[in-house]
Amino acid sequence: MAVGIFDSGLGGLTVYDAVHAAMPDQPIVYFGDNAHAPYGVRDADDIFEKTTFAIERLWEAGCDLVILACNTASAAALRRIQESWLPADKRVLGVFVPLIEAMTERSWGDNSPPREVAVKHVALFATPATVSSRAFQRELAFRAIGVDVEAQACGGVVDAIEEGDTILAQALVRSHVEALKRKMPNPEAAILGCTHYPWMAETFQDALGPDVKVYSQAKLVAESLGDYLERHPNMRGSGQESMFLTTGDPKLVSAHATRFLRREIQFISA
Ligand code: DGL
C-alpha cells in the first residue's frame, strides 16, 4: 500500500513530513535525486529523463501512485508524462493544483469556469525552470481571472539548501524578495513554488512583511493526497515498507535530512 514521493533532492521532504503527519500508517517511499539536483537549471528533456527514471524506481518499490513533490518536474515534465508515457494502471500527480485551488478558494477538483478571486497581486518564487515554463500562470488562468502574477526565479537557493548552507540560502532569499518587490511593491500573497523553500519560510515571511500571506504546498498536498486515496483506494501500491532512496551520498543526505526534519532519517542508495 505504499505511495511514492519524488523530488530532485531534499525539498520533497517538506511534503513527506506533512503526508506522514496526516497519515502516520501510510508506507511512503521517498526518492531524492540528490546527485542531479538542482533541476531548476536543467532543460525540459533532461528533467523528463531524470524524473521518469525515478518514477520507474518507485514502481519497483511497489508504488503505483507517485507524487512529484517537485514543482520543477511538475512544470517541465508532468504533462508529457501523463499524456504520452504513463501506463493506465499508474498515476503521477503534481503539486501545483492543490496550491492554486487553495489560493483561488476552490474545493478539490472544482473545474468550474475561471472567476474573480480576492487576491489580485501574487508574487511567485520558484526555480528558473518553473518560472520559464509559465505552468503556474497557465493553471491559474483555468481557475481565476484578473490576477497579476509577478514571478521571481530564485537562482542558487536550492543549491544552498542541498549543501546545508542556511546562511547563504537566507541571504539569497532576501535578495530575491527585494528583486521581486522592485517589480511588484505590494503583493497580497506569495507562493513558495518550490518544495525546498518551506525550509526558508520564516525568511520569506520576514522579508515580505507581515501583511503578505505566504502559501506553501506541503500541507495542501497532504490534504489532497488523503482525499485522493479515499476516492481511489486501489492506487495504494503493493509496497509495505517505508524507505528513503537517494542517488546521492546516503550518509550526507541522511545527515542533512535529519537536521531539517529534526529526527533520524536514514537514506539508502537508490
Ligand atoms: N524542490 C524542487 C521544486 O519544487 C526542485 C528544485 C530544483 O531541483 O531546482 O521545484
Image: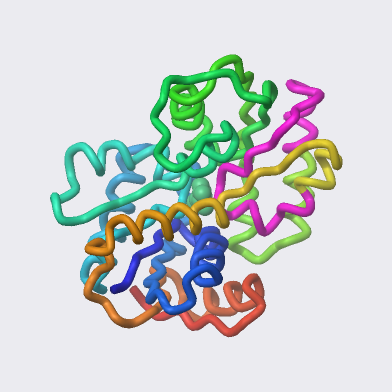
Query: What is the quadrant of the N terminus in the image?
Result: bottom left
Magenta part of the chain: 176-203
In the rendered image, residue 150, in percent from the top left (x then y), is placed at: 64, 24
The vertical placement of 18 against 104, above or below, is below
Query: Residue placed at 42% from the left, 38% from the top?
Result: 75
Query: Residue placed at 60% from the left, 36% from the top?
Result: 103
The vertical placement of 19 against 170, above or below, is below
Q: Quadrant of residue 179?
A: top right
Left/right placement of residue 222 relative to residue 177 reads left
In the rendered image, residue 226, in percent from the top left (x then y), is placed at: 43, 60
Query: Residue placed at 46% from the left, 40% from the top?
Result: 97
In the rendered image, residue 160, in percent from the top left (x then y), is placed at: 65, 56
In the rendered image, residue 24, in percent from the top left (x then y), is placed at: 48, 76
The vertical placement of 189 against 15, above or below, is above
Would residue 268 be counted in the magenta stretch? no
Farthest left residue in view: 88
Q: 142 or 108, which is in the foreground?
A: 108
Query: What is the quadrant of the C terminus in the image?
Result: bottom left
